[in-house]
Image (tube, grey):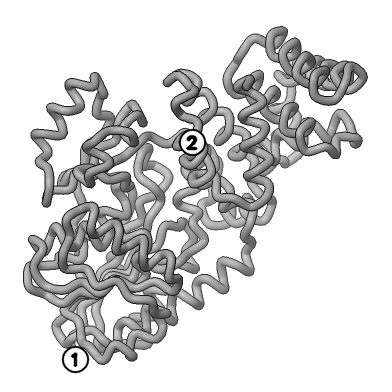
Amino acid sequence: MNIKVRIVKLLMEFEEGKYSNLLLNDYFREHGHELTRGEKAFITEVFYGVIRNLIFLDYQIDKRSKKVHRRWLRNMLRLSMYQAYFMNSDEAGIAWEATELTNEKLGTYVGGFVNGILRNFFREMEEEENFLRENDALDIFYSYPRWFYEKVVAEYGEEAEEVLKSYKRIPSMSVRVNTLKYSEEEFEEFLDRKNIKIIKYIEGGVYYLDSGSLIDTPEFKSGKIVPQDGASFLAARTLGAKAGERVLDTCSAPGTKSMVLAEDMKNEGTITSLDIHNHKVRLIRRSAKRMGVEIVEAKKLDAREVAELNTEFDKILVDAPCSGYGVIRKKPEALYNKDMESVEELANLQYEILTAASKVLKVGGELVYSTCTIFKEENTDNAAKFLAENPNFEAVSIELPGNIKGKFDHLGGFNIDYTEEHLDGFYIIKFKKNS
């Protein structure tokens, strides 16, 4: 099957509501043996690239025709325009291949229509950026919903355009070494053998790499290494869980943060890992088994109901459900399925979970609140509200590796922000219960 036809098929499945990362992983698991490493890389870049730039690409199509209703046709135009504009590929070759594939699928009349649309776009595309800038349409140029664009401008001011550009950057592959099964020295020797280069290292065993070809390796399958972003790793590591403690991970699935906690605890003590879905609880259990973790107790429970556990905990991690705007490099669809009302609803949910968790923390215990998003409603505002309403808690200082970019807020919480090239956008703050 032609590579571009494969991408069109994937984009059509994405439009049906499937998560982009799960969709692509499943596709490669089923069809990866049919593809070269270069073909996988091309599919990955174009598939994610189209999703990241969907608003811009659809604007360009609709500007030139109001007749593109067939999903196959629209996606062929999207990926062709993406190749030309964002990958600087040969325009004549792009137009020829799109026309031929459309001829085969929909007939020569539609093929000619595609050729005309693309040729028109190619002639005018160098003028598009200036036109959109002059017409206050950077939301279209960077492919963000208008409300999101205005929110970023309001919150970040002169830095807004750098924020918008940053979260369209192509992400790097990141993995963490499972120290219960493997050592960093062994992993680095493995990378040397594979000729894979380290782009960034985070103390504790997280590596950003120049290749994503690790999924099919025995090291990956046996749980010696696990895919994880450095930001979520640092949220778990900041808790400072110790051997023998009783720890609660309120919103655990898929379990990667619980596994970090287990490593910090030397596999001694108890970690109660919660999720509201049975299938995700099973996922946590499978992850623990694969990674050799024996102290995780995965349970189905709404984190707002943690009082039902009838237990007090030494440490609690509240990595709360959020809008996900800090991870849109990896999950770009988050931009298209939420709005400001969703942000406010999620902020309320996060606060309810944080408040419920705080009541089952021992006096003298510590709690980390974190989110993978970039707006103050879900981050600093929630933390400030919690401290104001719970005077028996204080924010305590946290330390992060020196090579992590971002800034502290006035409470002592840390925003891994748009200046960080590799890690997800994240907010981390730590509280201590004094009475």
Q: Nearer the viewer, residue 146 or 66?
A: 66
Instruction: Give the quarter of the figure containing the C terminus.
Output: bottom left
Compared with 344, 335 (above or below) is above
Q: Nearer the viewer, residue 407 or 157?
A: 407
Tag 1's secondary structure?
Answer: loop
Residue 124 seen anywhere in this rendered image of the structure: no
- 2 or 1: tag closer to the N-terminus: 2
Q: Amino acid at mark 2?
A: Glu
Mark 2: give few (<14), some (14-19) or many (20+) Cα within 10 Å.
Answer: few
Instruction: Give the quarter of the figure containing the N terminus.
Output: top right
Which of label 2 and label 1 is nearer to you? 2
Q: Amino acid at mark 1?
A: Ser
Q: Image quadrant of residue 392?
A: bottom left
User: Mark 2 = which residue?
Assistant: 30
Compared with 426, 59 (above or below) is above
Q: Are marks 2 and 1 in contact (CB under 8 Å)?
A: no
The circle drawn on residue 26 is none
Residue 78 seen anywhere in this rendered image of the structure: yes
The circle drawn on residue 435 is 1
